[in-house]
Image (cartoon, grey):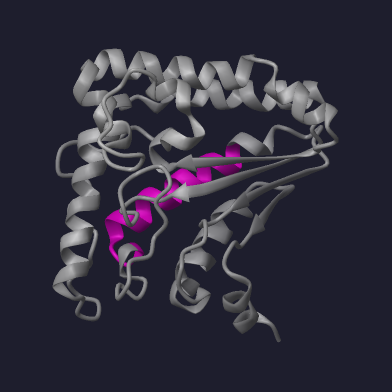
Amino acid sequence: PEPGFAASLFAEMPRPSPWDGDWASVVQATGREAARARYLAHIDRYIDGPLLAELAAAGNTLLRVPLGFWNLLAFPGPGGLHGCLDPSTAPASQHVKHAAAAAAAAHEAVWSLSSDAGADYLPRLERLLVRAEAAGFTAVLLDMHAPACSANGEEHGAVSLEGSKGLLLASATARNLTLRATAAMASLLASRTRLAWRAVELLNEPGEAPSLYASYYEAAAAVVRQHAGVDVVLCSWTYQLEELAP
């Protein structure tokens, strides 16, 4: 959660600037268990409060839910995200290698805070889908907003770094974790047959040409299509999507 979008979550928490620290500052200030309780209460307010009904009453019919892979899987143990850059791929700059290592460290230091997706997140996602239907939403898009080994290791992290040329999803570690999380997203939607439209967004604005992720997109789409009735969505800048046009 970025401070600008979740002011109540960061209330009375030390933050050097609107961007420095983010969630890490809350963890450091309160301790892991208190931070976990604060975060889950924040999610519950969105799910159980009046927001869904207000959005539906305003005429919205599509609910887009950005997710990180840790919302869907048990978090890998210490060191589980190291090696985000596959050494067998094209050489990456030292800047990219350093940033990838920092991203893995950020995942492990902050998001392992809630390591049990089955207890913390999956029941809440199920409840969100039920309440969205009850509020009048007819379409749901689950968005893989932060794959394993994302650029900054946080919930708004895409998979691009300047000069990385798609390498952050080149490693088997990153790909396998993200594909497993994508399969879990599709499985969540498969049972919501009352919805008129259900879809999984494979990556959020990866920041580089879709062709760099072609093999990943193919693998992720195949995982989603194992669940009848769940569609696949690609999200990127328009000028980059144009390269896919016939």
The residue that appears at 52% across and 66% down in the rendered structure is 217
Q: Residue furthest front?
A: 17
Residue 126's image quarter?
A: top right
Between 125 and 145, the residue placed more toward the observer is: 145
Q: Is residue 29 above or below residue 164?
A: above
Is 172 colored magenta in this rendering? yes
Q: Which image quarter is the N terminus in? A: top left
Q: Residue furthest bottom?
A: 246
The residue that appears at 54% across and 42% down in the rendered structure is 66
The residue that appears at 46% across and 64% down in the rendered structure is 206
Task: Return the x and y of residue 61 as percentages of the image width and height.
Answer: 81, 38
Task: Return the x and y of residue 176 as percentages of the image width and height.
Answer: 36, 53
Residue 120 visible within the image: no
Residue 79's image quarter?
A: top left
Q: Which image quarter is the C terminus in? A: bottom right
Task: Return the x and y of residue 4 as percentages of the image width and height.
Answer: 47, 36
Task: Return the x and y of residue 23 as percentages of the image width and height.
Answer: 32, 32
The residue that appears at 33% across and 57% down in the rendered structure is 151
Per the picture, the main secondary structure of the magenta-coloured stretch is helix
Is 99 colored magenta in this rendering? no
Q: Which residues are magenta?
A: 169-187
